[in-house]
Amino acid sequence: MMIGLGNAFADPVTTEASSEIKTHFVDEQIMIVADISNNQDIQQNFAYITQVSNANNVVISLSWLTGSLSPNQSFSPAQSWIPKESGTYHIQVFVWESIDNPDALSPPLSMTVSVVDMQS
């Protein structure tokens, strides 16, 4: 199982925390997307998990979806998050065997975003 480059509002998500912080706005929907591929010859169940933490490393959003990929199938799951206050947030994406089995199918992806109040 491989997880590839994805995006959050078309911004790259990589296995390295990006040095460039992306800016978004309070109450703006942010789509957290990654590309996953099953490069095996067997079907693979998976859980796609997104975790958002604030500057104090407190998890403020945790969501997931589960599914199954056929051999050589790819999928670009997306989870949305709407920040309710300004600040710096760390987004992590995990792909596990299942919610109950946290065996990682790929390295986690991460990025940092800055959320600001929209100017009126």
Image: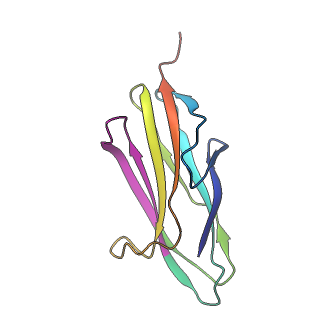
For the magenta stretch, what is the residue range?
Answer: 46-65
**Direction bottom: furthest residue:** 41
Q: How is the image coloured?
A: rainbow
Would you say residue 79 sits in the magenta stretch? Answer: no
**Direction top: furthest residue:** 120
Tell me if 102 is positioned left or right of 71 in this view.
left
Tell me if 23 is positioned left or right of 103 in this view.
right
| Position in image of residue 71 (x %, y %) | 65, 84
| Position in image of residue 32 (x %, y %) | 55, 49
Q: Is residue 60 above or below residue 84?
A: below
Query: For residue 102, what is the image quadrant?
Result: bottom left
Tell me if 89 is positioned left or right of 39 in this view.
left
| Position in image of residue 39 (x %, y %) | 66, 80
Q: Is residue 107 above or below residue 101?
A: above
Would you say residue 56 sits in the magenta stretch? Answer: yes
| Position in image of residue 2 (x %, y %) | 61, 71
Residue at (61%, 35%) from the top-left corner? 20
Residue at (31%, 36%) from the top-left corner? 56
Residue at (54%, 46%) from the top-left corner? 17
Residue at (47%, 19%) from the top-left corner? 117
Quadrant where the N terminus is found in the figure: bottom right
- In this rendering, the count of numbered labels is 0
